[in-house]
Amino acid sequence: MRVVVVGLGYVGSVCSACLAERGHDVVGVDTSPWKVECIRRGESPIVEKGLPELIARAAHAGKLTATTRIAEAMPGADIVLVCVGTPSAEDGSLDLSHVKRACAEVGTALKDSKQFVTVVMRSTMLPGSVLEELTPVIEQAAGGKAGRDFGVAYNPEFLREGTAVEDFFGAEYTILGAGCERAAAALQQLYAGVGGELIVTPIPTAEMLKYVNNSYHALKVAFANEFGRLCKREGVDSHEVMRLMRRDTKLNLSGAYLSPGFAFGGSCLPKDLRAVNSRARRHDLELPVLAGILESNELHVAEAVRLIERFKKRKLGFLGLSFKAGTDDLRESPILRVIGTLVGKGHDVLLHDPSLDMERVLGANRRFIEDELPYLPERLRSNLEEVLSHGDVVVIGNRSAAYRTLGPRIRAGQVVVDLVAALDRGSVTAGEYHGLAW
Ligand SMILES: NC(=O)c1ccc[n+]([C@@H]2O[C@H](COP(=O)([O-])OP(=O)(O)OC[C@H]3O[C@@H](n4cnc5c(N)ncnc54)[C@H](O)[C@@H]3O)[C@@H](O)[C@H]2O)c1
């Protein structure tokens, strides 16, 4: 393919050289004459392992050239990769001005194009940037319509500086956020044979994924460093602890606990986090990530209350009271704080949980129920149907098997608030479905 790469910085120069190595004809564009001259001479404008060799080979073979003018690079292009900077503005927001300028120039050049060109953003940008902010700029400059006259796409860049070339050819996956089928096909052709699995997604998903990935990496660093600081004060070998932590690939380094759902609870996580934070305070250590976890969890509970109250219905049915399915342990179950708040505000509430037998719970934990959950005994029902028909809003609080197939039983006018992604949204055909964070 004939590829134009706009921006020859860390992302653009690696991308240009690697695509040229794959046999594409690449023209790089940068406003910096120095970077353009570097590429023309077959030299790398940045320090990056393996890049000088790739650029030299591609430039000498005539597969990679460069110019300072987008208009000059565009004739004959099949695909344009926009890799210019998206720095932070003064207030921390994302500055899209460089990308907008580049998109306007690309759009102007599209007027003279005789073929379907796909304009692909590679710079990091927040969801909505491509479709709401940049596509209109290209459309206006081109006097055409995205999807009909040209394609738009977002292809996030996951390479790490220092191992970028290796990462390009050995990526776990390449994400193709495509605005139309032709744009997806162009990207699939561009990356055929490289970049791991090619996954086509909607553009906003691809935009958000870049931030999710980077935030997670940053969170991991901060998490390990905070425990490192605590370990040092405790005289514990932090590297040994984290090495063992990483060895558990079932619960620790895995997809476990990484699906949006309800707040965590139960008899361990809240208690143990409180203990860790209390010990840190004793050392006069500030560990804001660890301290913030419980705070974040509380906000999730508050969000559930807010969502349920939004419907302004008095009769509520709660399904699932323990913090997870298959246990009757009610200690620190976060749904109980939601229920307590709404009972306190005068809602007419009925409750169900397949694992809760009131007689047994009262036998074992009478004191706890009387002190903490006085509203429970008179509101708990063993008949699911009774609770389901009572609630104008039905709230699902854990993933008990008994609740998974409730979708078709939600009646017209009834609202289901799913706190745990128990239901398939499409299965609620008569009433309304609302997820907590989806
Ligand atoms: N550096 C990384 O490892 C990395 C990784 C993933 C994503 N990203 C993202 O990719 C984007 C680019 O990052 P970078 O590190 O390559 O930036 P960079 O500053 O190294 O390069 C950007 C280049 O774009 C050029 N440029 C700016 N406006 C232009 C225009 N209108 N026309 C032509 N060229 C123009 C600049 O001269 C510069 O050479 C950013 O959004 C960044 O967040 C960077």
Image (cartoon, rainbow, N blue to C red):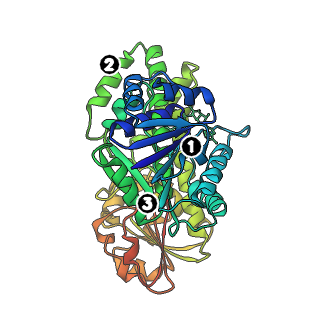
Q: Secondary structure at mark 1?
A: helix
Q: Which mark is residue 183?
A: 3
**Earlier sequence position, callout 1 versus callout 2:** 2
| Between 145 and 324, the one nearer to me in the picture | 145
Q: Amino acid at mark 1?
A: Glu
**Earlier sequence position, callout 2 versus callout 3:** 3
Q: Quadrant of residue 146?
A: bottom right
Q: CA distance from mark 2 to mark 3?
A: 48 Å
Q: Quadrant of residue 34?
A: top right
| Between 167 and 420, the one nearer to me in the picture | 167
> Left or right: where does residue 189 sit relative to residue 91?
left
Q: Amino acid at mark 2?
A: Glu
Whether the residue carrying mark 2 lies under 8 Å from ligand 1 is answered with no
The structure residue drawn at horizontal position 47% and vertical position 23%, both measured from the top left corner, is: 43
Identify whether 345 is placed above or below 105: below
Q: Which mark is residue 240?
A: 2
Q: Splitting the image into four quadrants, where does ligand 1 fall?
A: top right
- Of badges 3 and 1, nearer the viewer stands 3
Q: Position of residue 302 (x, y in %)?
A: 58, 56
Q: Secondary structure at mark 3?
A: helix
The structure residue drawn at horizontal position 40% and vertical position 63%, both measured from the top left corner, is: 421
Q: Is residue 272 visible?
A: no
Mark 2 and mark 3 in contact? Answer it, CB < 8 Å.
no
Q: CA distance from mark 1 to mark 2?
A: 29 Å
**Earlier sequence position, callout 3 versus callout 1:** 3
- Residue to which mark 1 is pinned: 295
Mark 3 and mark 1 in contact? Answer it, CB < 8 Å.
no
How dense is the environment of label 2, judged by Cα within 10 Å: few (below 14), some, or many (20 and up)?
few
